[in-house]
């Protein structure tokens, strides 16, 4: 227990080293437990996907969904990606997990299409190690083939850092993905240090403005100016723009007026389980806000 060890370290005077090493032991232990639990999670079928709608401002409809992974941990209940996705990435487990996400999301989108919602897009997050993996292109092609999903309905979301991390080395794989017919989005834009004009060297279709800017938008404030500038520049570079993390009416209307193309956030809709999407698609396909 970290509190107890801090107390003991203080009792012993300025022996901070002892406190830090004890706390680090605790962290390492927690990490080890998650890591070994994660290894079993795939075979035990503990992962599931939730889907958050993306709203198209011009047509006032749901244009697609982003698939977001959840882990139903047998002891700790449902865990969110920030609690385990880094470990999955560092250990390489993300390659197998990501393949499952891709295949599951494509099959789900196919079902929506079969139910009459033709053309709905499904957006899937892809991490750097997946993109680097030799078989990634084949996995994407196979996920499309087995689900019979039109390639144009699949979007891969890559973080700004994932795209630019290897300089222009990623261009060939991105071009091959584009050749399959899928679209590519830059996720969490604004959190790295790249400019849109640099990103335009890569064959991307869309930028997603990171939620940390969007959440703090107050008309007239700095974040509003940043969002507006991103939208303007993206449009001049023929890129489509999504704002994520729209939580309030004032952000919604600001982004609407700023000609942002698509919106995603708790203000419109939280991520949902597949069974909750069907009634949503049936009854609520236009924005009511
Ligand atoms: P992301 O790709 O930027 O996904 C959007 C995140 O913002 C999601 O968090 C979503 O639930 C959350 N969000 C949506 N609207 C709002 C809002 O209005 N306010 C706030 N505060 N948050 C909002 P989530 O599901 O916890 O996922 C976190 C990150 O984990 C994702 O960020 C993505 O980078 C990663 N991730 C999620 N699923 C996968 C996956 O299947 N594969 C990989 N490689 N990464 C994933
Ligand atoms: Mg994303
Ligand atoms: Mg992401
Ligand atoms: Mg994001």
Image (cartoon, rainbow, N blue to C red):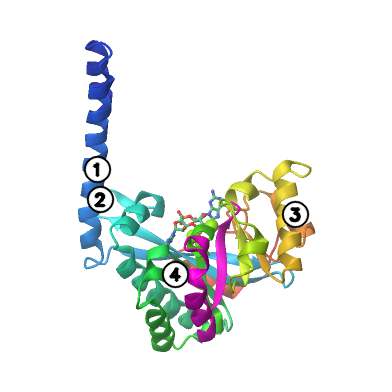
Q: Mark 4, residues whose alpha carbon is within 10 Å: few (<14), some, or many (≥20)?
A: few
Q: CA distance from mark 2 to mark 3?
A: 41 Å
Residue under pointer 2? 34
Residue under pointer 4? 275
* Circle 4: element type: helix
Q: Along the polypeptide, which appears first: circle 4 or circle 2?
A: 2
- In this rendering, the answer to whether 27 lies above or below 145 is above
Residue 101, given in percent of the width and then of the height, sits at 38, 70
Asked if labels 4 and 1 touch by Cβ distance under 8 angstroms, the answer is: no
Badge nearest the viewer, 1 or 4? 1
Q: CA distance from mark 4 to mark 2?
A: 29 Å
Residue under pointer 3? 228
Asked if labels 3 and 1 touch by Cβ distance under 8 angstroms, the answer is: no
Asked if labels 1 and 2 touch by Cβ distance under 8 angstroms, the answer is: yes
Q: Is residue 170 magenta?
A: yes
* Circle 2: element type: helix
* Circle 1: element type: helix
Closer to the camera, 39 or 69? 39
């Amino acid at each position: 227990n970290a509190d107890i060890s801090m107390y003991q370290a203080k009792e012993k005077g300025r022996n901070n080293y002892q406190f830090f090493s004890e706390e680090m032991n605790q962290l390492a232990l927690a990490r080890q437990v998650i890591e070994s639990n994660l290894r079993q999670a795939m075979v035990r079928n503990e992962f599931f996907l939730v889907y958050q709608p993306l709203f198209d401002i011009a047509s006032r409809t749901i244009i697609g969904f982003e698939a977001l992974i959840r882990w139903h941990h047998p002891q700790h209940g449902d865990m969110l990606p920030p609690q385990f996705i880094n470990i999955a990435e560092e250990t390489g487990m993300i390659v197998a997990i990501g393949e499952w996400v891709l295949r599951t999301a494509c099959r789900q989108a196919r079902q929506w299409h079969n139910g009459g919602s033709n053309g709905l897009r499904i957006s899937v997050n892809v991490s750097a190690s997946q993109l680097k993996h030799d078989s990634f292109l084949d996995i994407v092609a196979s996920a499309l083939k087995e689900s019979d999903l039109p390639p144009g309905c699949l979007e891969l979301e890559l973080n700004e850092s994932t795209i630019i991390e290897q300089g222009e080395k990623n261009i060939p794989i991105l071009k091959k993905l584009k050749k399959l017919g899928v679209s590519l989005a830059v996720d969490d834009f604004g959190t790295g240090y790249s400019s849109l004009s640099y990103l335009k060297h890569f064959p991307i279709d869309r930028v997603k403005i990171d939620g940390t800017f969007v959440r703090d938008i107050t008309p007239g404030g700095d974040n509003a100016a940043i969002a507006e500038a991103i939208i303007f520049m993206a449009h001049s570079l023929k890129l489509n723009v999504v704002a994520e993390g729209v939580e309030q009416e004032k952000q919604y209307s600001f982004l609407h007026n700023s000609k942002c193309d698509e919106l995603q956030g708790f203000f419109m809709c939280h991520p949902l389980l597949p069974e909750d999407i069907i009634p949503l698609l049936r009854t609520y396909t236009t924005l009511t806000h």
